[in-house]
Amino acid sequence: MPQLKDANVLVGTETHDDAGVYQLTDEIAIVQTIDFFPPVVDDPYVYGQIAAANALSDVYAMGGDPKTVMNLVAYPDDELGNFDWLARILQGGAERCQKAGAVILGGHSVRDKEIKFGLSVTGVVHPKKVLKNSGAKPGDKLVLTKALGTGFVTTANKRGTCPAETLKAACDSMVQLNSIGRDAALAVGGVHAITDITGFGFCGHAFEMADGSNVTLVIDANALPLLPGAEKLTQFRTRASKTNREYVEPSMRLEGTIDPVRMEFLWDAQTSGGLLISVDADKADALVAEARKRGANVTCVVGEVRAESDVSLLFRGSR
């Protein structure tokens, strides 16, 4: 589709980055993103928190600060007959926006048979401090700030078979703002690329970082943090598991022995997942410590960046 050419577009549709960036002045660029989806949990307040945290995350992944948001709502008002559930969704979203320091300016709603909620978010960033997913450098270490497995957990919960403690762990992770990882990265420095892990799963977003950076990411499959109890729920795959796997498999290779159950987490589509950060090797431990100090308690080093080889992703297991 033809696009208007504008030199102020710093990040646009031609890349796989998490949000668009448009320069306004020498000091200010705006970061824009939008995301919404149907309920992933039964509690409307928590669903609102998760949807908001997920939408805000794209701004953090670009190094920006969210400033304003617009609510996006689809709701079957003529079927439910009341708006109690909707009120709780909006309250949950507003709580996360307040935590992020972003102002809700309004929104738009439509009638729909399926409930959906999310945000359109505008943030700001210095034009020279935009973080992308395409700057990873050979020698970097890779740091992940949240555990994997939200797709399995939320699907199992819909089927009524998810243990309460596993669901709580997933919700606690999904509502956590990725400002933690962003702030830790900026505090430590030496960061070359960031992306947030969402619908394409860990493998899909890692592939886009490797492909955009013209490098190979070497991942220690055994180091990937998993939500407690999620390993018992991998039979509850979403449709995205299949498409994510098909998308990445031609560009990856396995080395050593990897537990087939653990492999499933590579493809699992995440909701409000963590940040994958490519950072100078000598800053990696400090980044992990800083993120954990700020509340991202499972943050860890999960791999390294190497010069481009015959594959974009190399997953290593036990010898």
Image (cartoon, helix red, strand yellow):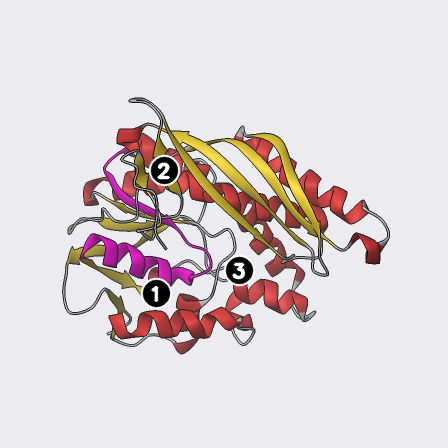
Q: Residue at x 35, y 39 (%)?
A: 289
Nearer-the-camera pick, 298 or 112: 112
Amino acid at pointer 2? Val
Residue 150 locus on image (x, y percent): 53, 60
Q: Amino acid at mark 1?
A: Asn
- Tell me how far mark 2 sits from mark 3, CA to CA: 28 Å
Magenta stretch in the rendered image: 189-214
Q: Which mark is residue 150?
A: 3
Residue 222, label in figure? 1
Q: Which residue is mark 2?
A: 21
Q: How many marks?
A: 3
Give the x, y percent position of residue 111. Answer: 73, 53
x, y (%) of residue 185? Answer: 33, 37
SS for dot 3: helix
**Horizontal side of residue 189 vs 308, given as left or right:** right
Does the image show residue 194?
yes
Q: Which mark is residue 252?
A: none
**SS of the residue at dot 1?**
helix
